Amino acid sequence: MRLKYKRKLQTFLIIILAYVFLLILFIDKIREFLMGVIDGLYGGQGMSKDLGTQITMASMIVTYLLFWGLSNILEKNISEPARKIADNMNLVSSGNLDVQMEVKDSFEFAEMEEAFNHMVLKLKEAQSIREQNEEQNRQLYAGIAHDLKTPMTMVMGYARLLKEEDISEDDRNHYLTIIEQQIKAANVQLEDMLEYAKYGSTDYKIFPEEGNIAGFLRGILADMFYRFEDRKIILEPEIPDKVICKYDTEQMKRVFTNLINNAIRHNPENTTFRVSIKEENGVIISFSDDGPFLEEDLKEHIFEPYKKGKSGGSGLGLSVAKRIVELHGGSLEYNENSDDGYKSFVVTLPMEWM
């Protein structure tokens, strides 16, 4: 495309230069030719002074018209496109990102118009992403403030009670226990927030190593089996003996543990929880259960920070899990199957690290 426009512009400029050169070269020749023709008509007796002056004036007028036509051609093909691009650039610089230029075949200006339209689209995408990030940050700050307010309020309340002189030793110990619990809860919130910020940083790196992710997942399920028994959750693993891919052990453990804990915490007794791994254009790891589906208003925002269901939670676990999986070059998605009544969180990882 660029070579095409460049060749057209070069051809156009060559023609214009040749046109100007011929005008300069032949302007006197044209005058001499016209005077010769007139002189022939007068039988070689010569022309009057007035007629010679008229021929000179006519030559000048013809030359002026030719140059006027040339300037119009240059105005239409060079000046106008350049002015349009400049005007639209000024509109964009003033904040108007709805500008789109009509791409015309006017040499390299068509390429510039295409590049301009592409630039505006990218600016709109960047603006949309920035607005989404700003909204997420507002929700994040509001969630932090809300979740920290409750434990801090309780700590302040029980701290005031401890100042009373007539409380019993049992009450004092009870108040101190509640204060300790609330401080721990606040600390968990702060740790989750720091983890979320850490994984969102462009400087954060993971260190994937090749390993048997099937055996790795079986080990996590074995360590957490007592929790399934405590909550009376029926575990049905469908995990092959060996599936090899590259993953960061510490970070992927955080992902799997979060997804398993969510299933245990947010489902009723006698829920069936299935964990499966298969190789199909990558490694697909599914965490499925037949518990209640998510609320409709939560489904589309389930991976956004501080989006919590009725059963609570910090609201950051899934956001962190999704970021970790994406750092591995994979994806984390939520699906529901109304036919079998199962909902699933599906982790997809590439077979080879990029």
Image: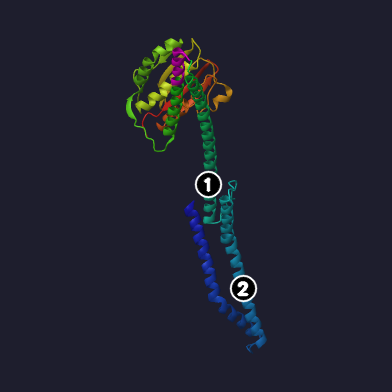
Mark sitting earlier along the chain (1/2): 2
Colouring chosen for the image of the structure: rainbow
Residue 177 on the magenta segment: yes
Q: Residue 285's image quarter?
A: top left
Residue nearest the viewer, comparing 113 with 305: 305
Task: Give residue 64's mark.
Answer: 2
Residue type at the position of mark 1:
His
x, y (%) of residue 332?
46, 27
Spatial CA span between label 1 and label 2: 42 Å
Q: Which amino acid does label 2 sit on?
A: Tyr
> For residue 42, what is the image quadrant?
bottom right
Give SS at disc 2.
Answer: helix
Secondary structure beneath label 1: helix
Q: Which of marks 1 and 2 is in front?
A: 1
Q: In this view, does 46 lie above or below 217?
A: below
In contact (CB < 8 Å): disc 1 and disc 2: no
Quadrant the C terminus occupies: top left
Residue at the far front: name it: 165
Q: Which residue is drawn at 59% across and 59% down?
A: 80
Q: Residue at x 52, y 50 (%)?
A: 115
Give the residue pinned by disc 1: 118
Instruction: Locate residue 235: give its quadrant.
Output: top left
The image shows residue 124, relative to residue 190, as above or below, that is: below
Residues drawn in magenta: 167-180
- Residue 104 visible to an observer of this rendering: no
Query: Does residue 160 appear in this view?
Result: yes
Q: Relative to residue 8, is residue 44 depicted above or below?
A: below
Rendered location of residue 350, percent (x, y): 39, 29
Q: Main secondary structure of the magenta part?
A: helix
